[in-house]
């Protein structure tokens, strides 16, 4: 069962799994996958929590409480996941950054020998910075998203800039 966007449903189908529609109150689900979506509602929450209570594994695409927008932060996928986890009393497995399932995927795709040369660029230290630590690569922090200029950033980044272009300029000087 996917409590999330069409992109998540497509990804689940792409690996050969059958997607149970959240509106199907009778279909059994082996897993409930929760991600960000704009049509979150009580009925979906109830069906997802019920599926988990009946034994489905709870999986989150990420646990980001908020996402940045030009108008300020909005509730993120982690907020929706927290609702399902609270309603079901179940601790979710998080598939995305900074957790091990995503780190293992990155290691499989690029290999472990090149990670010390890699740079994780992001705006959220709790996700992107921790993911850099998990992978053993550098962390480049951009101030154009969740955290801004002057905000405390832990873990400390290797590089810090106003935006991706500023990080690219620094990398061209240091690595170029």
Image (cartoon, rainbow, N blue to C red):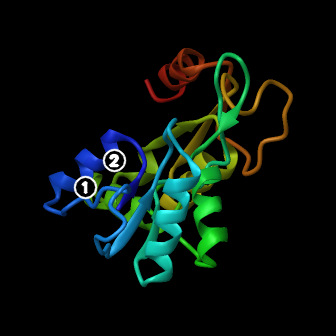
Which residue has dot 2 on it?
8
Most foreground residue, 156 or 173: 156
Residue 94 visible in the current orientation: no
- The N terminus: image quadrant: bottom left
Which residue has dot 1 on it?
12
- The C terminus: image quadrant: top left
- Quadrant of the image occupied by residue 153: top right
Q: Residue at x 57, y 23 (%)?
A: 167
Q: Please provide percent x and percent y for residue 47.
A: 47, 64
Q: Please provide percent x and percent y for residue 90.
A: 58, 78
Q: Residues within 10 Å of mark 2 (few under 14, many from 20)?
A: some
As helix, strand or loop, the secondary structure at mark 2 comes to helix
Q: Residues within 10 Å of mark 1 (few under 14, many from 20)?
A: some
Q: Residue at x 66, y 16 (%)?
A: 70
Q: Residue at x 54, y 15 (%)?
A: 165
Count of numbered marks = 2
Most foreground residue, 64 or 107: 64
Do callouts 2 and 1 mark residues in contact (Cβ within 8 Å)?
yes
Q: Please provide percent x and percent y for residue 75.
A: 66, 40
Residue 175 visible in the current orientation: yes
As helix, strand or loop, the secondary structure at mark 1 comes to helix
- Quadrant of the image occupied by residue 32: bottom left
67 sits to left or right of 47? right
From the viewer's perspective, is residue 40 above or below residue 148?
below
- Quadrant of the image occupied by residue 169: top right
């Amino acid at each position: 069962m996917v409590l999330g966007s069409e992109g998540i449903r497509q990804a689940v189908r792409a690996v050969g799994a059958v997607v149970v529609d959240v509106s199907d109150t009778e279909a059994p689900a082996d897993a409930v996958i929760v991600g960000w979506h704009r049509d979150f509602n009580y009925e979906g929450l109830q069906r997802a929590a019920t599926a988990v209570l009946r034994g489905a594994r709870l999986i989150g695409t990420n646990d980001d409480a908020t996402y940045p927008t030009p108008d300020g932060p909005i509730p993120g996928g982690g907020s929706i996941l927290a609702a399902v986890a609270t309603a079901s009393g179940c601790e979710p497995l998080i598939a995305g950054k900074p957790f091990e399932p995503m780190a293992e995927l990155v290691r499989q795709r690029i290999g472990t020998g090149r990670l010390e040369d890699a740079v994780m660029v992001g705006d959220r230290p709790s996700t992107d910075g921790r993911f850099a630590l998990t992978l053993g690569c550098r962390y480049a922090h951009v101030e154009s998203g969740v955290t801004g200029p002057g905000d405390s950033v832990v873990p400390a980044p290797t590089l810090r800039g106003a935006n991706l272009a500023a990080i690219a300029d620094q990398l061209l000087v240091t690595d170029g």
